[in-house]
Amino acid sequence: EAVPYEKEKLYENIRELYNELLIALDDGDYALAEELGIEAYLENFEYLEPDIEKVDAEHLYALELDMREELRKMIKFKESPTAIRTFLEESILPDLAYAQDLVTKADKSLLQSKMDRELKEMGDATDDQKSGVRGEIDFIRDTLQLLLVQYQDGQYPEAYTSARTAYLDSYEFVEIPLRAIDPDFTLEVEFQFAELRSLIKQQADFEEIKEVTIAIKRNMDESERLVSGTGTLAPAIAFTSSFAIIFREGLESVLILGAIITYLEASRNTKYKKYLYYGVVAAFGATAVTWIIAAYIIEISGANRELIEAIAALSATAILFYVSFWVLNKIEHKKWMEFVKAKVWQATTTGSVMVFVGLAFFTVYREGFETVLFYQAMAGFAKYMEVYVALGFVAGMVSLLVIFYVMRKLGKRLPLRALFGLTMGVGAYLSIAFLGNAIRELQVIELMPYTGMIGIIPRLDINLAAMTGIYPTLETVIGQIILLGIYLAAASYVLVLRPKRENKIAEMRKSRKVAE
Protein backbone atom coordinates (compact mmCIF):
# COMPACT_ATOMS: atom_id res chain seq x y z
CA GLU A 1 0.00 0.00 0.00
CA ALA A 2 1.42 3.37 -1.06
CA VAL A 3 1.17 5.08 2.35
CA PRO A 4 4.19 7.06 3.65
CA TYR A 5 3.57 6.60 7.39
CA GLU A 6 1.85 4.25 9.83
CA LYS A 7 -1.83 5.03 10.28
CA GLU A 8 -1.47 6.16 13.89
CA LYS A 9 1.25 8.55 12.87
CA LEU A 10 -1.08 10.10 10.32
CA TYR A 11 -3.70 10.89 12.98
CA GLU A 12 -0.95 12.44 15.10
CA ASN A 13 0.30 14.50 12.16
CA ILE A 14 -3.18 15.90 11.55
CA ARG A 15 -3.56 17.02 15.16
CA GLU A 16 -0.09 18.62 15.17
CA LEU A 17 -0.81 20.45 11.93
CA TYR A 18 -4.10 21.77 13.30
CA ASN A 19 -2.27 23.03 16.41
CA GLU A 20 0.17 24.86 14.16
CA LEU A 21 -2.79 26.17 12.16
CA LEU A 22 -4.33 27.71 15.28
CA ILE A 23 -1.00 29.33 16.21
CA ALA A 24 -0.74 30.79 12.68
CA LEU A 25 -4.26 32.22 13.04
CA ASP A 26 -3.39 33.80 16.36
CA ASP A 27 -0.46 35.44 14.57
CA GLY A 28 -2.78 36.64 11.82
CA ASP A 29 -1.11 34.49 9.16
CA TYR A 30 -4.14 33.15 7.30
CA ALA A 31 -2.06 32.08 4.26
CA LEU A 32 0.07 29.77 6.40
CA ALA A 33 -3.05 28.51 8.19
CA GLU A 34 -4.59 27.55 4.84
CA GLU A 35 -1.43 25.70 3.79
CA LEU A 36 -1.38 23.77 7.07
CA GLY A 37 -5.07 22.87 6.73
CA ILE A 38 -4.51 21.60 3.19
CA GLU A 39 -1.50 19.55 4.29
CA ALA A 40 -3.48 17.99 7.13
CA TYR A 41 -6.16 16.87 4.70
CA LEU A 42 -4.27 16.19 1.50
CA GLU A 43 -1.05 14.62 2.74
CA ASN A 44 -2.43 12.79 5.76
CA PHE A 45 -6.20 12.31 5.94
CA GLU A 46 -6.40 11.11 2.34
CA TYR A 47 -4.52 7.94 3.32
CA LEU A 48 -6.92 7.26 6.18
CA GLU A 49 -10.10 7.52 4.09
CA PRO A 50 -10.27 3.92 2.77
CA ASP A 51 -10.35 2.37 6.28
CA ILE A 52 -12.83 4.90 7.63
CA GLU A 53 -15.10 4.40 4.62
CA LYS A 54 -15.25 0.65 5.29
CA VAL A 55 -16.47 1.10 8.87
CA ASP A 56 -18.68 4.20 8.46
CA ALA A 57 -18.94 5.76 5.02
CA GLU A 58 -21.41 8.48 6.04
CA HIS A 59 -19.17 9.64 8.87
CA LEU A 60 -16.25 9.80 6.45
CA TYR A 61 -18.15 11.93 3.95
CA ALA A 62 -19.20 14.41 6.67
CA LEU A 63 -15.69 14.66 8.11
CA GLU A 64 -14.18 14.94 4.64
CA LEU A 65 -16.52 17.83 3.79
CA ASP A 66 -15.62 19.68 7.00
CA MET A 67 -11.86 19.28 6.51
CA ARG A 68 -11.72 19.90 2.77
CA GLU A 69 -14.30 22.62 2.28
CA GLU A 70 -15.77 24.14 5.43
CA LEU A 71 -12.47 24.74 7.20
CA ARG A 72 -10.82 26.14 4.07
CA LYS A 73 -13.81 28.38 3.45
CA MET A 74 -13.61 29.82 6.99
CA ILE A 75 -9.90 30.52 6.56
CA LYS A 76 -10.32 31.93 3.07
CA PHE A 77 -12.95 34.42 4.26
CA LYS A 78 -10.78 35.19 7.29
CA GLU A 79 -13.31 34.40 9.95
CA SER A 80 -12.18 35.03 13.52
CA PRO A 81 -9.57 32.69 15.02
CA THR A 82 -12.05 31.98 17.82
CA ALA A 83 -14.72 30.74 15.38
CA ILE A 84 -12.23 28.58 13.52
CA ARG A 85 -10.83 27.19 16.79
CA THR A 86 -14.36 26.33 17.92
CA PHE A 87 -15.07 24.57 14.63
CA LEU A 88 -11.88 22.56 14.90
CA GLU A 89 -12.18 21.65 18.58
CA GLU A 90 -15.91 20.96 18.65
CA SER A 91 -16.44 19.38 15.23
CA ILE A 92 -13.42 18.22 13.24
CA LEU A 93 -11.16 16.92 16.03
CA PRO A 94 -13.93 14.99 17.90
CA ASP A 95 -15.08 13.47 14.59
CA LEU A 96 -11.50 12.56 13.76
CA ALA A 97 -11.09 10.88 17.16
CA TYR A 98 -14.35 9.00 16.65
CA ALA A 99 -13.18 7.78 13.23
CA GLN A 100 -9.85 6.66 14.68
CA ASP A 101 -11.65 4.77 17.43
CA LEU A 102 -13.95 3.07 14.91
CA VAL A 103 -11.03 1.92 12.80
CA THR A 104 -9.02 0.76 15.84
CA LYS A 105 -11.90 -1.37 17.13
CA ALA A 106 -12.90 -2.70 13.70
CA ASP A 107 -12.23 -6.31 12.79
CA LYS A 108 -8.99 -6.62 10.80
CA SER A 109 -10.68 -8.80 8.20
CA LEU A 110 -13.14 -5.96 7.53
CA LEU A 111 -10.36 -3.46 6.87
CA GLN A 112 -8.50 -5.88 4.61
CA SER A 113 -11.58 -6.69 2.56
CA LYS A 114 -13.16 -4.73 -0.25
CA MET A 115 -16.11 -2.57 0.67
CA ASP A 116 -19.19 -4.68 1.27
CA ARG A 117 -21.92 -2.39 0.07
CA GLU A 118 -24.13 -2.09 -2.95
CA LEU A 119 -22.46 -0.12 -5.70
CA LYS A 120 -24.19 1.91 -8.38
CA GLU A 121 -24.10 0.92 -12.02
CA MET A 122 -21.84 2.72 -14.48
CA GLY A 123 -23.57 5.93 -15.58
CA ASP A 124 -25.86 5.98 -12.53
CA ALA A 125 -25.46 9.69 -11.85
CA THR A 126 -27.62 12.77 -12.33
CA ASP A 127 -27.30 14.94 -15.44
CA ASP A 128 -25.90 17.74 -13.28
CA GLN A 129 -23.27 15.38 -11.88
CA LYS A 130 -22.29 14.18 -15.36
CA SER A 131 -22.01 17.74 -16.64
CA GLY A 132 -20.07 18.78 -13.55
CA VAL A 133 -17.65 15.88 -13.92
CA ARG A 134 -16.93 16.82 -17.55
CA GLY A 135 -16.19 20.39 -16.50
CA GLU A 136 -13.91 19.32 -13.64
CA ILE A 137 -12.02 16.87 -15.83
CA ASP A 138 -11.46 19.55 -18.48
CA PHE A 139 -10.02 21.78 -15.77
CA ILE A 140 -7.79 18.96 -14.51
CA ARG A 141 -6.43 18.32 -18.01
CA ASP A 142 -5.59 21.98 -18.54
CA THR A 143 -4.01 22.19 -15.08
CA LEU A 144 -1.87 19.09 -15.67
CA GLN A 145 -0.74 20.58 -18.97
CA LEU A 146 0.28 23.77 -17.15
CA LEU A 147 2.00 21.69 -14.47
CA LEU A 148 4.29 20.03 -17.03
CA VAL A 149 5.30 23.40 -18.46
CA GLN A 150 5.98 24.78 -14.98
CA TYR A 151 8.02 21.75 -13.93
CA GLN A 152 10.07 21.74 -17.12
CA ASP A 153 10.85 25.44 -16.52
CA GLY A 154 12.04 24.65 -12.99
CA GLN A 155 9.03 26.27 -11.29
CA TYR A 156 8.67 23.50 -8.72
CA PRO A 157 6.52 25.33 -6.13
CA GLU A 158 4.11 26.43 -8.87
CA ALA A 159 3.99 22.90 -10.30
CA TYR A 160 3.20 21.51 -6.85
CA THR A 161 0.41 24.05 -6.42
CA SER A 162 -1.01 23.02 -9.81
CA ALA A 163 -0.90 19.33 -8.83
CA ARG A 164 -2.63 20.10 -5.56
CA THR A 165 -5.24 22.28 -7.26
CA ALA A 166 -6.02 19.63 -9.88
CA TYR A 167 -6.86 17.17 -7.14
CA LEU A 168 -8.18 19.22 -4.25
CA ASP A 169 -10.24 21.74 -6.19
CA SER A 170 -11.46 19.45 -8.99
CA TYR A 171 -10.98 15.72 -8.69
CA GLU A 172 -12.45 15.72 -5.19
CA PHE A 173 -15.76 16.71 -6.82
CA VAL A 174 -15.39 13.98 -9.45
CA GLU A 175 -14.98 11.50 -6.61
CA ILE A 176 -18.44 12.17 -5.17
CA PRO A 177 -20.41 10.30 -7.89
CA LEU A 178 -17.44 8.11 -8.88
CA ARG A 179 -16.85 6.59 -5.45
CA ALA A 180 -20.40 5.21 -5.38
CA ILE A 181 -19.72 3.43 -8.70
CA ASP A 182 -16.13 2.17 -8.29
CA PRO A 183 -14.46 2.99 -4.95
CA ASP A 184 -11.35 0.92 -5.72
CA PHE A 185 -10.68 2.83 -8.93
CA THR A 186 -11.31 6.10 -7.10
CA LEU A 187 -8.67 5.16 -4.53
CA GLU A 188 -6.23 4.24 -7.29
CA VAL A 189 -6.54 7.72 -8.80
CA GLU A 190 -6.14 9.34 -5.36
CA PHE A 191 -2.82 7.55 -4.94
CA GLN A 192 -1.72 8.62 -8.43
CA PHE A 193 -2.29 12.26 -7.52
CA ALA A 194 -0.45 11.68 -4.23
CA GLU A 195 2.45 10.10 -6.12
CA LEU A 196 2.56 13.09 -8.48
CA ARG A 197 2.76 15.54 -5.57
CA SER A 198 5.43 13.44 -3.88
CA LEU A 199 7.57 13.31 -7.04
CA ILE A 200 7.31 17.07 -7.48
CA LYS A 201 8.41 17.59 -3.87
CA GLN A 202 11.40 15.36 -4.54
CA GLN A 203 12.15 17.28 -7.75
CA ALA A 204 12.20 13.97 -9.60
CA ASP A 205 13.23 13.59 -13.24
CA PHE A 206 10.81 15.22 -15.69
CA GLU A 207 10.15 11.89 -17.44
CA GLU A 208 8.84 10.43 -14.17
CA ILE A 209 6.53 13.40 -13.72
CA LYS A 210 5.30 13.05 -17.30
CA GLU A 211 4.69 9.30 -16.92
CA VAL A 212 2.49 9.78 -13.84
CA THR A 213 0.69 12.70 -15.50
CA ILE A 214 -0.09 10.57 -18.56
CA ALA A 215 -1.46 7.82 -16.28
CA ILE A 216 -3.71 10.37 -14.55
CA LYS A 217 -4.94 11.73 -17.90
CA ARG A 218 -5.78 8.18 -18.97
CA ASN A 219 -7.77 7.69 -15.78
CA MET A 220 -9.60 10.97 -16.31
CA ASP A 221 -11.16 9.39 -19.40
CA GLU A 222 -12.03 6.30 -17.38
CA SER A 223 -13.52 8.45 -14.59
CA GLU A 224 -15.75 10.23 -17.09
CA ARG A 225 -16.83 6.95 -18.69
CA LEU A 226 -17.79 5.44 -15.34
CA VAL A 227 -19.82 8.48 -14.29
CA SER A 228 -21.37 9.29 -17.68
CA GLY A 229 -22.10 5.78 -18.89
CA THR A 230 -22.25 4.97 -22.60
CA GLY A 231 -25.55 6.72 -23.34
CA THR A 232 -27.49 5.77 -26.49
CA LEU A 233 -25.98 7.74 -29.38
CA ALA A 234 -22.39 6.53 -28.93
CA PRO A 235 -23.37 2.82 -28.92
CA ALA A 236 -25.49 3.43 -32.03
CA ILE A 237 -22.47 4.96 -33.78
CA ALA A 238 -20.30 2.05 -32.59
CA PHE A 239 -22.78 -0.43 -34.07
CA THR A 240 -23.08 1.48 -37.35
CA SER A 241 -19.32 1.96 -37.70
CA SER A 242 -18.66 -1.70 -36.98
CA PHE A 243 -21.27 -2.75 -39.51
CA ALA A 244 -19.81 -0.36 -42.08
CA ILE A 245 -16.25 -1.65 -41.60
CA ILE A 246 -17.01 -5.31 -42.19
CA PHE A 247 -19.54 -4.52 -44.91
CA ARG A 248 -17.17 -2.22 -46.77
CA GLU A 249 -14.23 -4.58 -46.44
CA GLY A 250 -16.21 -7.70 -47.28
CA LEU A 251 -18.16 -6.23 -50.18
CA GLU A 252 -15.18 -6.11 -52.50
CA SER A 253 -14.27 -9.73 -51.71
CA VAL A 254 -17.86 -10.88 -52.26
CA LEU A 255 -18.07 -9.08 -55.60
CA ILE A 256 -14.72 -10.35 -56.85
CA LEU A 257 -15.34 -13.94 -55.78
CA GLY A 258 -18.89 -13.82 -57.15
CA ALA A 259 -17.63 -12.53 -60.48
CA ILE A 260 -14.89 -15.18 -60.61
CA ILE A 261 -17.31 -18.01 -59.88
CA THR A 262 -19.74 -16.71 -62.50
CA TYR A 263 -16.90 -16.58 -65.05
CA LEU A 264 -15.77 -20.11 -64.19
CA GLU A 265 -19.30 -21.44 -64.57
CA ALA A 266 -19.78 -19.62 -67.87
CA SER A 267 -16.48 -20.98 -69.21
CA ARG A 268 -17.18 -24.47 -67.82
CA ASN A 269 -14.21 -24.40 -65.51
CA THR A 270 -16.19 -25.23 -62.35
CA LYS A 271 -13.49 -27.68 -61.25
CA TYR A 272 -11.52 -24.67 -59.98
CA LYS A 273 -14.33 -23.44 -57.68
CA LYS A 274 -13.32 -25.60 -54.73
CA TYR A 275 -9.81 -24.16 -54.81
CA LEU A 276 -11.27 -20.72 -54.49
CA TYR A 277 -13.06 -21.88 -51.36
CA TYR A 278 -9.79 -23.33 -49.99
CA GLY A 279 -8.22 -19.93 -50.43
CA VAL A 280 -11.13 -18.23 -48.65
CA VAL A 281 -10.86 -20.60 -45.64
CA ALA A 282 -7.09 -20.05 -45.48
CA ALA A 283 -7.64 -16.29 -45.58
CA PHE A 284 -10.09 -16.46 -42.69
CA GLY A 285 -7.54 -18.43 -40.67
CA ALA A 286 -4.77 -15.97 -41.48
CA THR A 287 -7.04 -13.07 -40.50
CA ALA A 288 -7.78 -14.71 -37.15
CA VAL A 289 -4.06 -15.20 -36.50
CA THR A 290 -3.41 -11.57 -37.44
CA TRP A 291 -6.10 -10.45 -34.96
CA ILE A 292 -4.53 -12.52 -32.14
CA ILE A 293 -1.06 -11.14 -32.85
CA ALA A 294 -2.32 -7.53 -33.02
CA ALA A 295 -4.30 -7.92 -29.78
CA TYR A 296 -1.24 -9.44 -28.06
CA ILE A 297 1.03 -6.60 -29.17
CA ILE A 298 -1.40 -4.03 -27.77
CA GLU A 299 -1.88 -6.02 -24.56
CA ILE A 300 1.87 -6.14 -23.78
CA SER A 301 2.52 -2.55 -24.88
CA GLY A 302 1.98 -1.30 -21.31
CA ALA A 303 3.07 2.32 -20.97
CA ASN A 304 3.30 2.59 -24.78
CA ARG A 305 -0.34 1.59 -25.26
CA GLU A 306 -1.44 5.09 -26.27
CA LEU A 307 1.36 5.27 -28.85
CA ILE A 308 0.44 1.87 -30.31
CA GLU A 309 -3.22 2.86 -30.49
CA ALA A 310 -2.30 6.17 -32.13
CA ILE A 311 -0.18 4.37 -34.74
CA ALA A 312 -3.03 1.91 -35.40
CA ALA A 313 -5.48 4.79 -35.81
CA LEU A 314 -3.14 6.69 -38.16
CA SER A 315 -2.55 3.53 -40.21
CA ALA A 316 -6.31 2.94 -40.43
CA THR A 317 -6.77 6.56 -41.54
CA ALA A 318 -4.15 6.18 -44.28
CA ILE A 319 -5.63 2.93 -45.60
CA LEU A 320 -9.18 4.27 -45.55
CA PHE A 321 -7.96 7.38 -47.35
CA TYR A 322 -6.35 5.26 -50.07
CA VAL A 323 -9.28 2.86 -50.34
CA SER A 324 -11.80 5.70 -50.58
CA PHE A 325 -10.00 7.17 -53.59
CA TRP A 326 -9.70 3.71 -55.11
CA VAL A 327 -13.46 3.29 -54.69
CA LEU A 328 -14.04 6.66 -56.35
CA ASN A 329 -12.30 5.34 -59.44
CA LYS A 330 -14.31 2.09 -59.40
CA ILE A 331 -17.76 3.58 -59.08
CA GLU A 332 -18.65 3.08 -62.70
CA HIS A 333 -19.86 -0.48 -63.22
CA LYS A 334 -18.04 -0.83 -66.53
CA LYS A 335 -14.70 0.06 -65.01
CA TRP A 336 -15.35 -2.24 -62.09
CA MET A 337 -16.07 -5.25 -64.34
CA GLU A 338 -12.93 -4.53 -66.35
CA PHE A 339 -10.96 -4.74 -63.11
CA VAL A 340 -12.56 -8.08 -62.20
CA LYS A 341 -12.09 -9.57 -65.66
CA ALA A 342 -8.41 -8.69 -65.60
CA LYS A 343 -8.02 -10.62 -62.35
CA VAL A 344 -9.88 -13.65 -63.63
CA TRP A 345 -8.09 -13.69 -66.96
CA GLN A 346 -4.73 -13.69 -65.19
CA ALA A 347 -5.76 -16.77 -63.17
CA THR A 348 -7.33 -18.78 -65.99
CA THR A 349 -4.47 -18.29 -68.42
CA THR A 350 -2.03 -20.04 -66.10
CA GLY A 351 -4.40 -22.91 -65.27
CA SER A 352 -2.54 -23.57 -62.04
CA VAL A 353 -4.63 -24.72 -59.07
CA MET A 354 -2.52 -22.68 -56.65
CA VAL A 355 -3.22 -19.55 -58.66
CA PHE A 356 -6.91 -19.87 -57.79
CA VAL A 357 -6.11 -20.60 -54.13
CA GLY A 358 -3.78 -17.64 -54.07
CA LEU A 359 -6.22 -15.36 -55.86
CA ALA A 360 -8.99 -16.14 -53.36
CA PHE A 361 -6.59 -15.99 -50.41
CA PHE A 362 -5.15 -12.59 -51.22
CA THR A 363 -8.53 -11.20 -52.28
CA VAL A 364 -10.00 -12.06 -48.87
CA TYR A 365 -6.90 -11.66 -46.67
CA ARG A 366 -6.15 -8.20 -48.01
CA GLU A 367 -9.55 -7.12 -46.79
CA GLY A 368 -9.14 -9.21 -43.63
CA PHE A 369 -5.87 -7.48 -42.75
CA GLU A 370 -7.48 -4.08 -43.19
CA THR A 371 -10.46 -5.25 -41.12
CA VAL A 372 -8.16 -6.28 -38.26
CA LEU A 373 -6.47 -2.89 -38.37
CA PHE A 374 -9.75 -0.99 -38.38
CA TYR A 375 -11.32 -3.03 -35.57
CA GLN A 376 -8.19 -2.78 -33.43
CA ALA A 377 -8.25 0.99 -33.93
CA MET A 378 -11.93 1.07 -32.98
CA ALA A 379 -11.43 -1.24 -29.98
CA GLY A 380 -9.16 1.34 -28.38
CA PHE A 381 -11.91 3.97 -28.50
CA ALA A 382 -15.14 1.98 -28.08
CA LYS A 383 -14.57 1.01 -24.46
CA TYR A 384 -17.67 -0.46 -22.76
CA MET A 385 -19.33 -0.60 -26.19
CA GLU A 386 -17.76 -3.88 -27.31
CA VAL A 387 -21.15 -5.62 -27.46
CA TYR A 388 -22.42 -3.08 -29.98
CA VAL A 389 -19.24 -3.46 -32.05
CA ALA A 390 -19.72 -7.25 -32.06
CA LEU A 391 -23.39 -6.91 -33.05
CA GLY A 392 -22.42 -4.59 -35.89
CA PHE A 393 -19.85 -7.13 -37.07
CA VAL A 394 -22.41 -9.96 -37.04
CA ALA A 395 -24.99 -7.83 -38.86
CA GLY A 396 -22.41 -6.92 -41.49
CA MET A 397 -21.43 -10.54 -42.06
CA VAL A 398 -25.07 -11.55 -42.43
CA SER A 399 -25.60 -8.76 -44.96
CA LEU A 400 -22.62 -9.95 -47.00
CA LEU A 401 -23.97 -13.50 -47.04
CA VAL A 402 -27.32 -12.17 -48.24
CA ILE A 403 -25.61 -10.21 -51.03
CA PHE A 404 -23.62 -13.27 -52.06
CA TYR A 405 -26.82 -15.35 -52.13
CA VAL A 406 -28.67 -12.73 -54.18
CA MET A 407 -25.83 -12.60 -56.69
CA ARG A 408 -25.29 -16.33 -56.98
CA LYS A 409 -28.75 -17.85 -56.61
CA LEU A 410 -31.02 -15.16 -57.93
CA GLY A 411 -28.70 -13.71 -60.52
CA LYS A 412 -29.53 -10.16 -59.49
CA ARG A 413 -27.30 -7.27 -60.45
CA LEU A 414 -26.34 -5.02 -57.58
CA PRO A 415 -26.44 -1.21 -57.67
CA LEU A 416 -22.66 -0.97 -57.49
CA ARG A 417 -22.56 2.78 -57.97
CA ALA A 418 -24.78 3.34 -54.94
CA LEU A 419 -23.00 0.70 -52.86
CA PHE A 420 -19.54 2.03 -53.61
CA GLY A 421 -20.67 5.60 -53.10
CA LEU A 422 -22.07 4.65 -49.70
CA THR A 423 -18.94 2.78 -48.64
CA MET A 424 -16.81 5.69 -49.79
CA GLY A 425 -18.79 8.05 -47.56
CA VAL A 426 -18.55 5.69 -44.59
CA GLY A 427 -14.83 5.21 -45.16
CA ALA A 428 -14.31 8.97 -45.24
CA TYR A 429 -16.24 9.39 -41.97
CA LEU A 430 -14.29 6.62 -40.23
CA SER A 431 -10.93 7.95 -41.37
CA ILE A 432 -11.80 11.43 -40.06
CA ALA A 433 -12.86 9.92 -36.72
CA PHE A 434 -9.71 7.78 -36.51
CA LEU A 435 -7.54 10.80 -37.30
CA GLY A 436 -9.12 12.85 -34.51
CA ASN A 437 -8.56 10.03 -32.02
CA ALA A 438 -4.98 9.46 -33.17
CA ILE A 439 -4.09 13.14 -32.71
CA ARG A 440 -5.72 13.13 -29.28
CA GLU A 441 -3.72 10.04 -28.20
CA LEU A 442 -0.51 11.74 -29.34
CA GLN A 443 -1.49 14.79 -27.28
CA VAL A 444 -2.06 12.64 -24.18
CA ILE A 445 1.48 11.22 -24.40
CA GLU A 446 2.94 14.67 -25.11
CA LEU A 447 4.06 13.91 -28.67
CA MET A 448 1.86 16.65 -30.09
CA PRO A 449 1.04 20.11 -28.75
CA TYR A 450 -2.27 20.63 -26.97
CA THR A 451 -4.23 23.83 -27.58
CA GLY A 452 -7.58 23.75 -25.79
CA MET A 453 -10.65 25.21 -27.51
CA ILE A 454 -13.29 24.51 -24.87
CA GLY A 455 -16.11 27.00 -25.34
CA ILE A 456 -15.39 27.27 -29.07
CA ILE A 457 -15.59 23.62 -30.12
CA PRO A 458 -18.46 21.57 -28.63
CA ARG A 459 -17.36 19.45 -25.65
CA LEU A 460 -18.88 16.05 -26.38
CA ASP A 461 -19.40 13.24 -23.91
CA ILE A 462 -16.24 11.09 -23.80
CA ASN A 463 -17.91 8.12 -25.53
CA LEU A 464 -19.42 10.25 -28.29
CA ALA A 465 -16.11 12.06 -28.73
CA ALA A 466 -14.30 8.73 -29.07
CA MET A 467 -16.71 7.52 -31.76
CA THR A 468 -16.49 10.75 -33.79
CA GLY A 469 -12.93 11.87 -33.03
CA ILE A 470 -14.23 15.36 -32.23
CA TYR A 471 -12.31 16.92 -29.32
CA PRO A 472 -12.08 20.58 -28.28
CA THR A 473 -8.43 21.05 -29.27
CA LEU A 474 -7.05 23.12 -32.13
CA GLU A 475 -4.85 20.32 -33.46
CA THR A 476 -7.61 17.71 -33.80
CA VAL A 477 -9.96 20.22 -35.44
CA ILE A 478 -7.36 21.36 -37.99
CA GLY A 479 -6.42 17.78 -38.86
CA GLN A 480 -10.03 16.73 -39.39
CA ILE A 481 -10.95 19.84 -41.39
CA ILE A 482 -7.98 19.33 -43.75
CA LEU A 483 -8.87 15.68 -44.33
CA LEU A 484 -12.56 16.52 -44.84
CA GLY A 485 -11.58 19.22 -47.33
CA ILE A 486 -9.49 16.75 -49.34
CA TYR A 487 -12.39 14.30 -49.46
CA LEU A 488 -14.86 16.97 -50.57
CA ALA A 489 -12.50 18.25 -53.26
CA ALA A 490 -11.81 14.74 -54.57
CA ALA A 491 -15.48 13.77 -54.53
CA SER A 492 -16.40 16.99 -56.36
CA TYR A 493 -13.82 16.26 -59.04
CA VAL A 494 -14.68 12.60 -59.58
CA LEU A 495 -18.44 12.87 -59.27
CA VAL A 496 -19.10 16.28 -60.83
CA LEU A 497 -16.20 17.94 -62.63
CA ARG A 498 -14.71 14.90 -64.38
CA PRO A 499 -18.07 13.62 -65.72
CA LYS A 500 -18.84 17.11 -67.05
CA ARG A 501 -15.47 17.25 -68.77
CA GLU A 502 -15.89 13.75 -70.22
CA ASN A 503 -19.40 14.63 -71.48
CA LYS A 504 -18.08 17.80 -73.03
CA ILE A 505 -15.32 15.89 -74.81
CA ALA A 506 -17.84 13.28 -76.00
CA GLU A 507 -20.09 16.01 -77.38
CA MET A 508 -17.18 17.64 -79.18
CA ARG A 509 -16.24 14.32 -80.80
CA LYS A 510 -19.84 13.75 -81.77
CA SER A 511 -20.03 17.21 -83.35
CA ARG A 512 -16.87 16.56 -85.36
CA LYS A 513 -18.25 13.31 -86.71
CA VAL A 514 -21.45 15.06 -87.75
CA ALA A 515 -19.43 17.79 -89.44
CA GLU A 516 -17.38 15.22 -91.34
Image: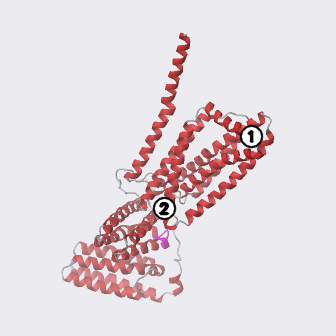
Q: Classify mark 1: residues with Cα within 10 Å, few (<14), some (14-19) or many (20+).
A: few
- The residue drawn where x is 54% and y is 53% is 235
Q: Quadrant of the C terminus?
A: top right
The x, y position of residue 412, in whole percent, is: 70, 34
Q: Secondary structure at mark 2?
A: helix
Residue 511 lies within the magenta run: no
Residue 476 in sight here: yes
Residue 181 lies within the magenta run: yes
The residue type indicated by label 1 comes to Thr
- The residue drawn where x is 45% and y is 86% is 103
Q: Which residues are magenta?
A: 179-185
- Tell how many labels: 2
Between marks 1 and 2 in the image, the one whose residue lies nearer the viewer: 1
The x, y position of residue 262, in whole percent, is: 74, 36
Quote the CA–CA distance across marks 1 and 2.
47 Å
Q: Which mark is residue 306?
A: 2
User: What is the quadrant of residue 390 in the picture?
Assistant: bottom right
